[in-house]
Image: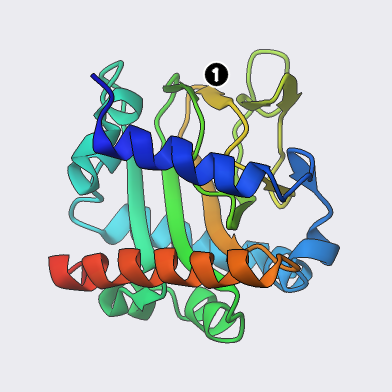
Amino acid sequence: MESLYELSSRTMRRVYDARIKTPSVLDAETYFPDAPTFQAAWPQIRREALAVLANAPSIPRFHEIMPTQADLSANDGKDWRMYLLKVYGQPVRSHLAACPVLASLLEAAPDVLSATLSYLAPHKHIPRHSGPFRGILRYQLNLEAPPGVDGQPGATLWLAGEEYRLAEGESLLWDDTYPHEVWNRSDRIRIALLLDVRRPAMPLELRMLSRAVTTGVGMVARWRGLD
């Protein structure tokens, strides 16, 4: 039987898909003008992400934050850990304090709704799935991209039939409602900054719907006391 989450996700996709006709990968400078600022600061962000990894007592696994994501996070016994800094507009202040450079960048980028440092364990596989909500776009900036057996970055993003292997300091703006999956085919942790950014230039009614959705999720995050 279809769950309420699945039904609402499918309905949401139909609403947006009827009006939005963009490809799976988008030009970052057009759709997220703050992207060059984050990319230019990647060495400093990387240092902060490595310090978090070394000093944080326990970075939670994704399914420990969102149990509904267990199929993606707990599927193979290997860790996918998430250090949340901002969740749909709600700051996680203690985590932002540990990453002052990143916190400053986020403060100056109002279109960033959520920000996470993603730590993908060696040989972790995130199964194929699709996000529910086209009102946001995913900006990914790789901070630690260890090589695979061929010497190229070992972590692969399969997205809508194409493979992307981002090196350290490389980034991609993409629509996570397209089918995608990830492998880390290396012997070390892959670290990436993941930003959910507000999709620009939508029709008025979709902008209003998007704000309602993101505000609602942000209120839930505050109620759960993520900070």
Q: Is residue 212 above or below residue 196?
A: below
Q: Is residue 88 visible?
A: no
Residue at 30 percent of width and 73 percent of height: 92
Element type where label 1 sits in the image: loop
Quadrant of the drawing holding the C terminus: bottom left
Quadrant of the drawing holding the N terminus: top left
Q: For this rendering, which residue is in front, 2 or 75?
A: 2
Residue at 51 percent of width and 32 percent of height: 130
Left or right of residue 94: residue 52: right
In percent of width and height, residue 206 lies at 60, 64
In percent of width and height, residue 208 lies at 54, 72
Q: For this rendering, which residue is in front, 164 or 47?
A: 164
Residue at 42 percent of width and 70 percent of height: 212
Query: Looking at the image, which residue sits at the far left?
Result: 224
Q: For this rendering, which residue is in front, 97 or 203?
A: 203
Quarter-of-image position of residue 213: bottom left
Task: Please rate how many residues cluster around mark 1, counting C-alpha atoms within 10 Å: few if below 14, some from 14 to 19, many from 20.
Answer: many
Q: Which residue is mark 1?
A: 185
Q: Is residue 4 above or below residue 173?
A: above
In percent of width and height, residue 156 lies at 63, 25
Q: Is residue 10 visible?
A: yes
Q: Could you tell me the amino acid type at mark 1?
A: Arg
Residue at 69 percent of width and 25 percent of height: 160
In percent of width and height, residue 14 lies at 57, 40
Q: How is the image coloured?
A: rainbow
Left or right of residue 79: residue 176: right
Q: Is residue 127 above or below residue 70?
A: above
What count of labels does the image hold?
A: 1
